Amino acid sequence: MTEPFFFPGGEPGVLLIHGFLTAPGEMRPLGEHLAAAGMTVSGIRLRGHGTQPEELAKATWQDWLTDVEAGLAELRRRCARVCIAGLSLGGALALYAAAHDPVERVVTFSAPDSALAQHPLLRLAKAHAGIIRYIPKIGSDVRDPEARRNHFTYTKVPLHGILQIVALMGTIDAHLPHITAPTLLVQSRHDLVVPPRTAQRIAARLGGPSRVFWVERGGHTVVMDYDREIVFAQTQAWLSGDEDIA
């Protein structure tokens, strides 16, 4: 659940990026679905994730972006066409990367924008980062009980890591108009982490065609939660170019 994965296949190549505090395993079922459809799939692990919270306390958002860029470069050595998809933090990194390293198509799941930096938890972390190093992770926004049990996540949160998200979110909006690749924004109506209206705000700023796909039952981690099979099918169609983007 915590290790990167790679499934060789045909075109396109797809880079999958997990979310904050988690690991590649949360993207693996989607990766297996895309691989079964004939795509080449790479699920990377962001610096400081899937090990111990102390490792995350050393990582910067620039480290995470470097990991994404390395993953794209490796896929380009194997595939002529490359797409990118990410969950939450991974979605923000996918958008940032797509603005600077042209890809064929983009999919985000529960991606935040700059407004997330105003979230009370993030503002609290910023105010106390010099005093407190870690806070406990409270609760889960995975609504499916079985999926919640199988979801790897750190149980304590390095405030340094939260500050990295604040810094990344402070830059993200300026890059959105530079994204010209067709972009699918998958968003749950019941997301307790990223306000659902965020997907519409991101779509309005993008420089290329986009579509918002609403998930009706799952929570923030839409690739593991209720309706995940619908999410997988929509993602496959979009990355294959079968989905209407008019």
Image (cartoon, helix red, strand yellow):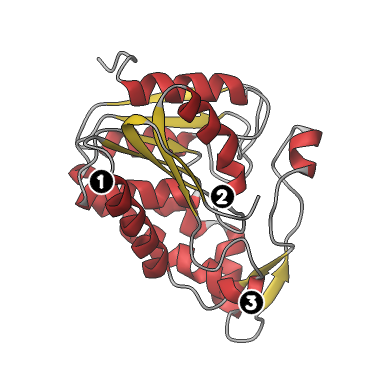
Residue type beneath disc 2? Pro
Q: Nearer the viewer, residue 63 or 36?
A: 36
**Element under disc 3:** helix
**Element under disc 1:** helix
Q: Nearer the viewer, residue 40 or 139?
A: 40
Q: Earlier in the sequence, mark 1 or mark 3?
A: 3
Tag shown at residue 76 = 1
Residue type beneath disc 3? Glu
**Residue 63 in sight:** yes
Within-10-Å neighbours for mark 2: few <14, some 14–19, many 20+: many
Q: Is residue 211 left or right of residue 182?
A: right
Q: Earlier in the sequence, mark 2 or mark 1?
A: 2
Q: Nearer the viewer, mark 1 or mark 3?
A: 1
Q: Earlier in the sequence, mark 3 or mark 2?
A: 2
Q: Is residue 96 above or below residue 136?
A: above
Looking at the picture, how far across and down is residue 204, in whole percent? 29, 34
Looking at the picture, how far across and down is residue 222, in whole percent? 59, 33
Q: Residue at x 25, y 14 (%)?
A: 246
Q: Is residue 215 left or right of residue 179?
A: right
Q: Nearer the viewer, mark 3 or mark 2?
A: 2
Looking at the picture, how far across and down is residue 65, in whole percent? 36, 61
Residue type beneath disc 1? Arg
Pointer 3 residue: 54
Quarter of the image for residue 177 reads top left
Disc count in the image?
3
Q: Is residue 5 above or below residue 159?
A: above
Q: Residue at x 31, y 52 (%)?
A: 74
Q: Nearer the viewer, mark 2 or mark 1?
A: 1
Tag shown at residue 24 = 2
Q: Is residue 118 above or below residue 203?
A: below
